[in-house]
Amino acid sequence: MFFSLSKFLWAVASPINIVIGLSVLGAVLLCTRWKYLGRRLALAGALGLVLLAASPLPRVVLRPLEDRFAVVDDAGRGPISGIVVLGGALGVSRGQIVLTSAASRLWAAAVLAHKHPEAKLIFTGGNAIPNATPEAKIAGAVFRLFDIPAERLLLEDRARNTRENALFTRDLVKPKPGEAGFW
C-alpha cells in the first residue's frame, strides 16, 4: 500500500508533471469561457517546461542539497566492513544494460571495493515492475565486469524504493549493535 501510494503521490507532485498539467489545463480552458485564465495557465506551463527542461534551474536548486554533506575521505578510517550501493542506476532495454544518470554510484562503489578488498559490496535494488529483472541481478553482472569477485557481492533484489532499500539491506547484513564500518 505504502509503495503504491508513494508512486502515485510523486506522479502527481513531480514538478515536471505539475507544469505539464498546467499546460494541458490551460489548453482545455482556451476552449471555454475562461479563455483568459487558460492563456495564463498555458503560458505558465510552457514557461515552467522551459525552465525545467532547458535551463540550469534544476541544477542550481539541487546544488545546495548535494553540497550539504562533505565528500567522505576514507583515509585513516580503519577497515571497512562493507560498501552499500543503492539501486536506481541500471535497467535493461531490448536485452541490453542501460545506465541512468545515477550510474556514477556504480563506478564509485567499484573504486572503493578495489581500495578495500576486505569489504563486502552490497547492492540493493529490485524492480517496481512485476516479473522484470531485478536491478541487483544486473548490478552483479556489472560489478563482475569491474573485476569484483562474486563471493564479495551481496545482492538484495526485493527493494522497490529507498525505504525498502534500508529495511531489506539491514535484514540481509544483520549488523551487530554498535557495529560500524559500513559505507
Image (cartoon, rainbow, N blue to C red):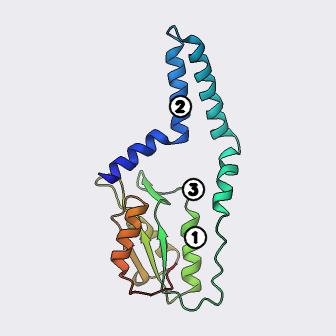
The residue depicted at 65 percent of the width and 64 percent of the height is: 68
Can residue 50 be seen here? yes
Residue 139 screen position, x and y as percent: 44, 68
Image-quadrant location for residue 156: bottom left
Query: Badge 3 is on which residue?
Result: 101
Left or right side of 143 for 170: left
For the residues bearing labels 1 and 3, Cβ distance under 8 angstroms: no
Secondary-structure class at tag 2: helix
Q: How many marks?
A: 3
Can residue 156 be seen here? no
Residue 22 screen position, x and y as percent: 54, 27
Secondary-structure class at tag 1: helix
The residue depicted at 50 percent of the width and 73 percent of the height is: 145
Check residue 142 in the rendering and tell me which mark sits there, or answer none. none
Q: Which badge, 1 or 3, is on the more N-terminal residue?
A: 3
Left or right side of 137 for 103: right
Q: Which badge, 2 or 1, is on the more N-terminal residue?
A: 2
The three-letter amino acid code for the residue at tag 1 is: Trp
Query: Badge 1 is on which residue?
Result: 107
- Distance, label 3 to label 2, CA atoms, is 22 Å
Residue 141 screen position, x and y as percent: 43, 70
The residue depicted at 47 percent of the width and 66 percent of the height is: 86
Residue 125 screen position, x and y as percent: 40, 64
Q: Nearer the viewer, mark 2 or mark 1?
A: 2
The three-letter amino acid code for the residue at tag 2 is: Ile
Left or right side of 162 for 114: right
Query: Badge 2 is on which residue?
Result: 20
Left or right side of 43 for 1: left
